[in-house]
Amino acid sequence: MNAPQDTLPVVGTARPHESAHLHVAGAAPYVDDIAEVQGTLHAALGLSPVAHGRLLGIDLDTLRAQPGVVAVFSAADIPGANECGPIVHDDPILADGVLHYLGQPVFAVIATDRLAARRAAALAKQVIRHEALPPVLTALDGHAKQQYVVPPMHLKRGDASAALAASEQRVSGSFSLGGQEQFYLEGQISYAIPQEDGGLLVHCSTQHPTEMQHTVAHALKLGAHRVQVVCRRMGGGFGGKESQSALFACVAALAAAKLKRPVKLRPDRDDDMLITGRRHGFEFQWEVGHDAEGRITGVEIDLVANAGFSADLSPPVMTRALCHFDNAYWLPAVAAHGYCARTNTQSNTAFRGFGGPQGALAIEMILDDVARGLGKDPLDVRRANFYGTSECNVTPYGQVVRDNIIEPLVARLEESCDYRARRTQIAAFNATSPVLKRGLALTPVKFGISFNVAHFNQAGALVHVYTDGTILANHGGTEMGQGLNTKVAMVVAHELGVRLDRVRVTATDTHKVANTSATAASTGSDLNGKAAQDAAKQIKHRLAGFAAGKHGGAVEDVRFGNDRVLVNGLSVPFDELVQQAYFARVQLWSDGFYATPGLHWDREKLQGNPFFYFAYGAACSEVVIDTLSGEWKLTRADVLHDVGQSLNPAIDIGQVEGAFIQGMGWLTTEELWWHPQSGKLMTHAPSTYKIPTANDCPADFRVALYDTQNPADTIHRSKAVGEPPLLLPFSVFLAIRDAVSAVGDHKVNPPLRAPSTPEAILDAVDAVRAATAEA
Amino acid sequence: MSQAHTSAPSASGGGPAATPDTVRPVRFFHRGEIVSLDDVSPTRTVLNWLREDAHCTGTKEGCNEGDCGACTVMVGELHGEHIAWQTVNACIQFVPVLDGKALMTVEDLAKTDPQQPAAAAVLHPVQQAMVDCHGSQCGFCTPGFVMSMTACYERHQALGTQPTRQELADELSGNLCRCTGYRPILDAGQRMFELPVQRIDEAPIAAALRSLRNEPPLRRPDFRAPRTLADFAALRAAKPEARLLAGCTDIGLWVNKQFRDLGEILYIGEVAELKAIGEVDGMLEIGAGASLEDAWSALSRHWPAVREMHLRFASPPIRHAGTMGGNIANGSPIGDSAPVLIALGASIVLRHGEAVREMPLEDFYVDYMKNRLEPGEFVQALRVPLPRASQVLRAYKLSKRYDSDISGLACGLWLQLDGEIVRDARFAFGGMAAIVKRAKGAEAALRGHAWNEATLQAAMAALDSDYTPLSDLRASDNYRRRAARNLLQRLFLETRPASPLSTKQISVWSDIV
């Protein structure tokens, strides 16, 4: 194995993912790889064939008569709450009375094998009797009908209208921004196995085991202590397995409880995409006032999100969008209005960034427009609007930005990527290139870390030291590839001064650490790292006390390091001390707990201190577009990103790069397309929904971490890394817009929508050409 | 599912001599032994067999349609004394197709000691490089990447070469990763050649495959795999209702996604004569059973301008399994082969029993998914005229993603130039109508005229009456119309007599193709 496994210190070094050696050998089990218990049955879901309708009945007899079918369940069979919504109770497990979208689960078929279940469930169109109702398929249609999943939200500071009226210049604009499918490579899956005394064990690919435990318990009218949810690892989550895994957990659990047999539910990829929600698409419309330098004096904006048929996590997603509309900029007067439009489509949900990227991209579009209107370099206009460090440093929601490093970070990137010289070179290229145009953009990121709901910001952990000196750690976070278990193991090893290979982290299990929060909002290692450190510290203190008692010296002088314990001039191997401590009846395991300090949030007024700190970053992207076809290519990207003092630079770089490419996919190739009449999502598989491939990773990709300590007291002064870098590829989208703009000599704001498919780019090119010809 | 393993490959088995008319088990090499399956369904996928029957869960299901690569496995065939390994998508390959071949999965690479935990396994250089370079995050796509990289590794080790980073990216175009952003995987693809060499031990596999050669052609209830063209043609004539199966790349989806019952299957993949590609009478003849990879490679050699189309056509695993004959017979209005072949003036050779007929490919398509195949008839070959002087060909493909994406529109544009005069033109577009179809109006606007801005404009205008495209998830009618016109303009800019533009000036892909 890798040499660094045995080197010390642990924290701050590049270590491979704890499962890397298993991943590459196909030896890392996911839920579907768990050996099936004898008698296991398989479930499949029958989906609504219409986008909106009244459910009149289901021909259950036809379904029951299908080969291999053991049982069929519908809403009427659910003993408890037919409900799996995380906030508002408007999310049925199985459709009841109303069909809300095409793809909504209406019934579950349980059969002896998966194919038989799928074949029977595919009869949905024949067996579901319904009366069609007119669907609402777009956010703007829902907004026009004032049809919302929660009341509109307003984030205001000052008098935006008055500020606009008093501004030297005013510009209005609009922007259409598509949603995004998580496309976790491992689809949704739950495997429920009945246990003694009415209990259930559910293996579930989920970011939120505790919420799965609760929804299953409510649906089955069980106490939470009878439901055990376990997740060793997910094949990707990205937010798509936070609330959206509940439906599958509930159906598998329902069938297992009813039939007293193990039941597995693994929807096919197409069904997964037809059933579950994704990143919210947004429509923006704004008016902005600014001065001659491009400094914003006032801005008013409508943010209309497609929430889908139910609330799900749309309210906090919209809150985060509103709280990130400022991105890195001081907005003296602002009125931002958030509308979560109800439509007859999948219920949109969490996806890496959780509304933050959508809100922040809006202000970047606005500044891009302002810069073009003034004939200035967009970077200069951005810089003119950056938050200050001692003044102009209060967010529209009232939090003081105390850790602002955006100016020095951007300055460093601007220099290292040779921004100004390349700007000149690109202008020269464009002047003589008839078909291809190049574009460049440098965009900043400021991203707030913490759940906007204060009470989610807590975590627990368990650390066991065994008598042989090996250590088992467990915590409330889930592993979805982000390297959380690796980081937690490193924190524990570091705290106890031992080799990393002494520590193993095991499956997240509601029977071990209770009442956990979702592994979301980038908080996984902040929260669980601190909780595990707390547990390790307690063990360390007990061991230190024991060592000092045995060997003399002061407790506070005992040192743990290099796999040994230094006490009163004596160096004792860690495992030896542990062995001795056990015989002396010292408790060698401990729980640990952490709650993020200083957070408060007024959900009604959208004011408070919702974030513990901010993470920063910036990226510069260069693209080339084809003005005949709309094809484009990213030729170079430079990234400088702030993760505080990195716990594991290899993992952090991996998160930054992965987020960059994923965010680029969202803004470029990943187009969601619902049939305008039927409302069926037609891009429901990788054949039609196109996430980036290896060829989309730029050949020239320069990624660096901005080396600095987090001023906030986080785990080893690190910063969260999951979501913030997803905003870096704004630079790709804006570079494409810059290249389109070159067609009109940068005089016209290109009406470029996202995702900027070749069609969207050609539309924008043609619009710029038309507007230029008119002028 | 009953399954018998014989630990040592036996010469021809000890049982009663099998004859071509006897049903026999499907036999293939897997994990050091010959697997013999005597009641496997003809449409059981290799992936389901691996995961559910063989309990080898290292290979993952991501999409069940051959588009994500999580299920990538290697299939080995005896080529002379050596084994040729190719990647395929296990999720859409049927088990009987493995007959006589070797199946290798991610579990077969590391050298494991059964006495030791998995952590102690000695990883294969591909696997070790992935660990060293942090090439896995969630790990779910990783087995598929490892297999694609292993196939690449073996091929290059055999030749003593190393792939460029660009070649690696092309090799991996059928493997989706949602976590890493690919950079560390591409790093690993280079790093794997720096580690101590470890090759597949081919001798025992080759011995097993040689022994399997003695088996008669596979015959199963509802599955026949004749080995000679004559047998195949006779069987096809006798069973006009049977389903022809070539690469499984489309039919696999009928089974996995639509639950279609295929009835009796006639598998074309064992007929060596149909895999041949050769030059006959100034024509490139591509057997209907030749893989897409082989067929596109041959076309690219003669017409370098189609190389981009070749690299962007689906993904390596799909190009290995799928056939150009199947792609043409399938007749998708957006299939990328037909526009290029029609523009080149290709013809299609059809066969019924002993009777062979040939027609221009453009006449083969009648309407949406309808062609001129008669009952009992099948596609035997495609014939493409070899390049001659003064001819110009361009193949353009527009899609949302560079790699492995179905075209919004694609075209083959062919010109016969005589100085500045266009003597002849053949323009064929996919994605613009219910079938791949020539742009007769645009061609006529050019034929006999000087190749200049005015004739270009006339041809572009004529395209509007040549096609009435539809809107769908891939592109709107409006985009298709404008882009088709613009592609004619691109052709002009690239091939005009006066100061033509270079590929570098005209294509965003020029650095990578």
Image: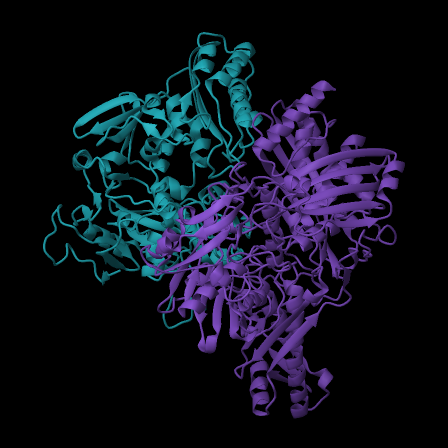
How far across and down, in percent of the image, does residue A49 sit?
A: 47, 45
Q: Camera-side residue: A227 or A641?
A: A227
Q: Residue furthest right?
A: A166
Left or right: residue B159 compared with residue A372: left
Chain colored purple: A
Chain colored cyan: B
Q: Quadrant of residue A625?
A: top right
Total marks in image? 0
Residue at 22%, 28% (x, y): give it.
B351
Left or right: residue A171 compared with residue A114: right
How far across and down, in percent of the image, does residue B88 sit?
A: 37, 47
Left or right: residue A241 compared with residue A411: left
Q: How is the image coloured?
A: by chain
How far across and down, in percent of the image, does residue A754 sit?
A: 63, 38
A445 to A31, vertically: above or below = above
A277 to A621, vertically: above or below = below
A638 to A563, vertically: above or below = above
> Is residue A720 something one can see in this rendering?
yes
